Every structure is written in structure tokens, then in C-alpha cells.
DNA sequence: ACTCGTAATGGGATCCATTTTCATATAGCC
DNA sequence: GGCTATATGAAAATGGATCCCATTACGAGT
């Protein structure tokens, strides 16, 4: 399933995990380079693509359409509420939506139904700062 | 609210409405040109941006991140189930999710909470064709 | 530990949707 | 009809993501 274990891939996963929030590939690349862990940008993109395929990360898009990654909790698939100002995210209890999506999908006659659910807002800390 | 009523803007909205499904800006531009309605691509993008700001269209992103537009039904905000193969979409009854999103948002301490909900699958017609 | 085949790397080129620029056209008010 | 702020559109710029390909290095086999 996973390919060879290279220094680069290990570093990408380690630094991503240390983030605890959604980060873009570019941002992650900067963090790696800043931490004196030289990894090419292409390699970061490839590592993230592979992690995504392996179901190890959750992916969302910000308003500009940029892809943001976050390590997926061990207990599987999650949805998040993300601060549009600072990016802080928290996983949600989404049982209700999961059941709704399943039911609607089944009733529709469509097959292989997938869903995207994202909430965004301004977190308490950001509401405090400025206005 | 809208600015001047130009031939181009009128055409964009008319052809978009005739589509009855999600279309990309580029696709819409091709349809316009094909129908002998010359409109610049930039103008299509600008018209769609304005329609979006005015709440006249719903916007989703396909898997490639491309933005797709569909005229919004008169009764407001909707969510859709879209065929990943051919693009056919149907509006969903999303009361359950609306209430869930509202509750979760309120409990979170975040303000100005917004949500994105999209279902995608393979429609009956596409399942029939090939495999 | 050494070799070797093959997958992985990375810097630059390339892709492509979307935005910006700016000279020109025109809607809409007098 | 004239005026002017606004809209247009062709071309250039932007920027995230992917591709290319010569080079590197993982790791299985010995
Ligand atoms: Mn889910
Ligand atoms: Mn909704
Ligand atoms: Zn915040
Ligand atoms: Zn279909």
C-alpha cells in the first residue's frame, strides 16, 4: 500500500501531525524548510496525495480553492468547523448528517454516493481580537 | 443592486438558466459563442461573480476544484446531489442538515457560521452506460 | 555489507482556471 | 444628442497543482 519509507515522506507526515490543524501544501513546505528539513515542493504534494489516497488525512478547500490537509483521527472519517480567520478547526459530531446523507443517497437512485460537509465561522479568539 | 443591464449580462443569465444544471464558466462561454452570442470570457467570469454575490446562483466545486454554477431556485438556498460522470444534479430536501448545522454552530462558540454540503454519485443513466 | 532494479526525489517547465490590466465601447441619465 | 461612469474583451499575469526527467537512494536479495 504505502511505497518506500523515505526521509521526506516521514518528515511530511510528522510535521503535518504536529500542526493539529488544516495546512496547505505550500505552508507545510515552508514549515519543513524552516525547520531545516529540506524537502522539495513536488515531494510534499506527492506525499499529501498519497496520504489522501490512503485515507490518512482529511482535505478541505478554503474559499480561494486551495486544498488544506489535516491528519485524520484514528476513528475514521470526520467533518470540521473551521475558523475563516485563523484556521483553527474542531471535529464535529456528525452522526445526524451521516445518516441523512446515507438515506438521501439511497433514495436517489444514484450509486457510489459521497458527501462533503464543512462548517466555517469565526472562532471565539478571533471574535475577541479586532472586530 | 446589479449594475448596468448589458446585452452580455442578460445573455449569460439567460443561457445559464437554460442549462438547468451546473456548468463551469468556460463551458458557459463555449455555449454562448456557439449560439452566436459573442461574449468575452472575462465578462462571463465577471457576470457569474456578480450573480453569486447577488445570491442568484449556487456554486459548487468539482473534484478538480473548478467552480460550477447553477441558477438558484426562487425559494432560496439549496443543496444538490450531482452526478460525477455527467453533471446532472437534483436539489435535495436538506432541512435535517440545516437544523444540524444551526445547532452545531450555535453550540460551538463560533460566530457567522456558514456551511457547505454537497452529495455526488453516479446517476442512473450513467450507471446504465458502460460500467 | 554489497549490488542492483526500481521507486522516489526535486527543480524547473507546464498546465489551466481565474484575475487583472487597460484601451475602447456603451448604458443610461441630463 | 452629448457625457461620463461603468462595462467589455483581448492579452498578460497569477498561482496552485501537476508533469518531466536526470539523479538519488530505499530495500530486497544475495
Ligand atoms: Mn461524513
Ligand atoms: Mn444549507
Ligand atoms: Zn479564529
Ligand atoms: Zn450521470
Image: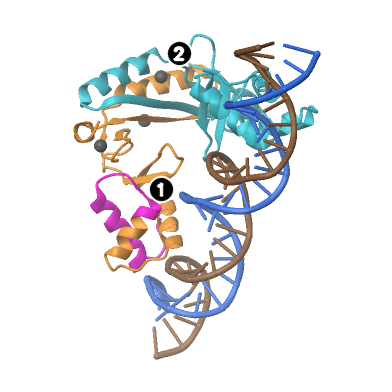
Chain colours: A cyan, B orange, C blue, D brown
Circle on res. A93: 2
For residue A127, above or below residue D26: below
Give D13 or B125, whichever is nearer the viewer: B125
Q: Which of A102 and A25 is in front in this view?
A: A25
On screen, residue A8 versus residue A98, left or right, reads right
| Left or right position of D18 against B61 | right
Q: Which chain carries label 2?
A: A
Q: Quadrant of the C terminus of chain B?
A: top left
Judged left or right of residue A61, residue B50 is left
Q: Where is residue A21 in the image (x, y as percent from the top left)?
A: 61, 23
Q: Mark 1 points at which residue?
A: B52
Q: Give the range drawn in magenta.
A: B1-27
The residue lying furthest to the top in this view is A75
Q: Is mark 2 within 8 Å of ligand 1?
A: no
Measure the C-alpha gap from mark 1 to mark 2: 30 Å
- C8, above or below B65, in the image: above
Question: Residue A112's spot in the image, x, y percent?
Answer: 30, 24
The secondary element bearing badge 1 is classed as: helix
Amino acid at each position: 500500500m504505502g511505497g518506500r519509507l523515505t526521509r521526506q515522506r516521514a518528515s511530511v507526515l510528522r510535521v503535518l501531525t504536529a500542526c493539529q490543524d488544516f495546512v496547505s501544501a505550500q505552508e507545510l513546505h515552508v514549515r519543513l524548510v524552516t525547520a531545516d528539513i529540506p524537502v522539495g515542493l513536488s515531494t510534499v504534494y506527492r506525499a499529501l496525495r498519497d496520504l489522501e489516497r490512503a485515507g490518512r488525512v482529511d482535505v478541505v478547500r478554503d474559499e480561494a480553492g486551495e486544498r488544506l490537509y489535516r491528519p485524520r483521527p484514528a476513528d475514521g472519517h470526520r467533518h470540521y468547523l473551521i475558523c475563516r480567520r485563523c484556521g483553527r478547526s474542531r471535529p464535529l459530531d456528525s452522526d445526524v448528517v451521516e445518516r441523512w446523507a446515507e438515506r438521501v443517497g439511497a433514495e436517489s437512485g444514484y450509486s457510489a454516493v459521497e458527501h462533503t460537509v464543512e462548517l466555517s465561522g469565526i472562532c471565539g479568539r478571533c471574535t475577541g481580537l479586532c472586530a
